[in-house]
Amino acid sequence: MNKRLFLACVFIIVGYCFASAQNVKKIEVEPYLGLTAPIRDVGYNARGTAGLNLGMEVRYNISASPISIGADINLATANRILKKDNGKHSDNVQRMASLSVVCDWNFRQSRNFSYFVGLGIGGCQRESMKTGIDNSIGICPSYGIIAAPRFGIEVWNHLRLTLEARFTQRDYNLIAFRLGVPVGGGSQNSIK
């Protein structure tokens, strides 16, 4: 436990030393689109396939600080195909709609390439839609908490590439890659 606490403190101190105070506009909105993949295979000859990641994020850039806080609304899917011995298959699509509070730590802000790490925590509704071999459909909704650590790069203050993990429940956990277009952010110098 002490070793983990020590490593966390070192990470925060090093990050603070290399983070830069922001000279950016206060509010930015980022619509994004991307792909997801399930983190874990569920066995039974199941194979994960790409799913959709769609959402919008609103962030407030705190003045003279490398921190941004905001909210994220997201719709993501994790797809799996289950193959049977007789060659037939069934599909299992896990959909997740979430609303999260997000916080990012920005490095090299206001430059052509700025990096960030962050975390989102919130609530989600999960649905598992199973299409059986006989084309029957079953939907099982549930609710839960989501944690989404992430890191990425912002290019020219107009393009944001993010890689994140979305953890909620074992079968719904996924890795997401997204491409966002921040609107309203960017350098304060562009206001003049």
Image (cartoon, grey):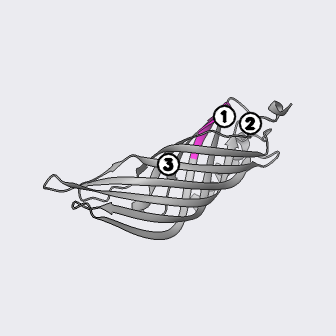
User: Which quarter of the figure has residue 5?
Assistant: bottom right
Q: Which residue is mark 2?
A: 186
Q: Which segment did they paint magenta? A: 151-160
**168 over 112 or under it: above or below:** below
Magenta stretch: residue 144 in it? no
Mark 3 or mark 1: whose residue is earlier in sequence: 3
Alpha-carbon distance for marks 3 and 2?
24 Å
Q: Which mark is residue 53?
A: 3
Q: Nearer the viewer, residue 144 or 86?
A: 86
Please say whether residue 128 is visible from this viewpoint: yes
Alpha-carbon distance for marks 2 and 1?
7 Å
Amino acid type indicated by mark 1 = His
Residue 166 is left or right of residue 26, and the answer is: left
Residue 59 is left or right of residue 82, and the answer is: right
In the rendered image, the residue lying farthest to the right is 192
* Residue at (57% x, 59% y) in the render: 4
Q: Secondary structure at mark 3?
A: strand
Residue 89 image point, x, y percent: 22, 54
